[in-house]
Amino acid sequence: MRQVLTFAIIAIITISCSTNQDDWYQIQQLDKRTYIISEPHSSQRNSSFLIIGEKEAILLDAGTGENGKQSMAQVADSLSPVPVTLLLSHFHFDHIGGASDFRKVGLAALPFLANRLSADSILVLTKTEVLSNDTVSLKIDRLYPVGEAIDLGHRNIELLHTPGHSKASIALIDHEQRYLFTGDLIYNDLLLVNNCEAYLQSINTIYKHSNPDYRIFGSHGTPEVDYAHLAKVKEALTAYLADDDSFDSKKNISFFGTPKQVYQKGDVAFMVGYSDVFDH
Ligand SMILES: [Zn+2]
């Protein structure tokens, strides 16, 4: 996330979205109803994903909010002919940064989240959940069911609960187009693991709902991830839990001033535990 380990050149259709910070957003069209909106110059090299149906669209993640000149909401609205609802893959600052600009915000109907909604549907996220110095309040307009089809209008997607990076992490699947949007569970850069057992279970959940014909898109760095990367991450985390010595390296780094160990196995790099870094 904060540490970018790999750089790759990707073929992207660049659309100039702004008269100001002209090349902040890069937009890649996967098909006529699906876009990747990337922020390659943002601190975390984030990507958000716009999934458009005939009645409504979902934007997975609000972006970093670091571009003050044009919001992610404006970009999504300019691409979608139908109303856009924001859905967050999880609540970390770099995914929620642009959330306040959205007219509608959805939430996975996970009981531990839905139970926290106030009478007027406000969800207050803690500093630890956001990894920020501030809490964030979201007005939730609708709950999306977990593990069943969500109909966007002649386009169904499925929402899966995939904890491990964070407790509230979700992934979206489009079974017809065979797309998997994995948030911060699987991407090409340094992975931040919070709960290793849950992370492994979530990888199994992804396996259960997909096969190698699916294309995986993660939220940081080069968006598209080889399906085979799932197996490599699974192998690396399994080795970590077994405390075996098969890692290529274990490097000590300073992560926001806190010493952390980065484990490297093949092209998978990960760190376990990160919330403490932001606990001050
Ligand atoms: Zn995150």
Image (cartoon, helix red, strand yellow):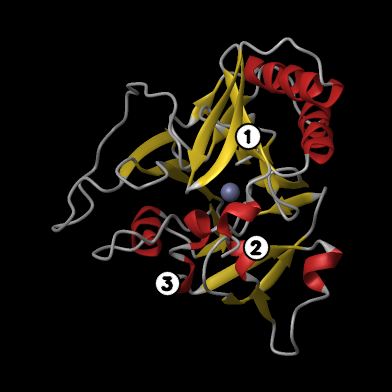
Residue 66 placed where, x, y %? 34, 59
SS at mark 1 in the image: strand
Q: Amino acid at mark 1?
A: Met
Q: Is residue 21 left or right of residue 257?
A: left
User: Whole-Å distance between the Cαs marked 1 and 2?
Assistant: 18 Å
Comparing labels 1 and 3, the label whose residue is closer to the camera = 1
> Which residue is found at the position 75% from the left and 25% from the top?
237
Name the image quarter holding residue 118: bottom right
Residue 84 placed where, x, y %? 50, 62
SS at mark 2 in the image: helix
> Which residue is found at the position 23% from the left and 64% from the top?
69
Q: Residues within 10 Å of mark 1 (few under 14, many from 20)?
A: some
SS at mark 3 in the image: helix
Give the mark, 1 or 2, whose residue is nearer the N terminus. Answer: 2
Q: Residues within 10 Å of mark 2 (few under 14, many from 20)?
A: some
Q: Amino acid at mark 3?
A: Asp
Q: Which residue is mark 1?
A: 271
> Which residue is found at the position 56% from the left and 31% from the top?
187
Q: Which residue is mark 3?
A: 101
Q: Which residue is mark 2?
A: 129
Name the image quarter holding residue 109: bottom right
Q: Amino acid at mark 2?
A: Glu
Q: Is residue 102 visible?
A: yes
Give the mark, 1 or 3, whose residue is nearer the N terminus. Answer: 3
Give the mark, 2 or 3, whose residue is nearer the N terminus. Answer: 3
Q: Which mark is residue 135?
A: none
Residue 36 placed where, x, y %? 43, 40
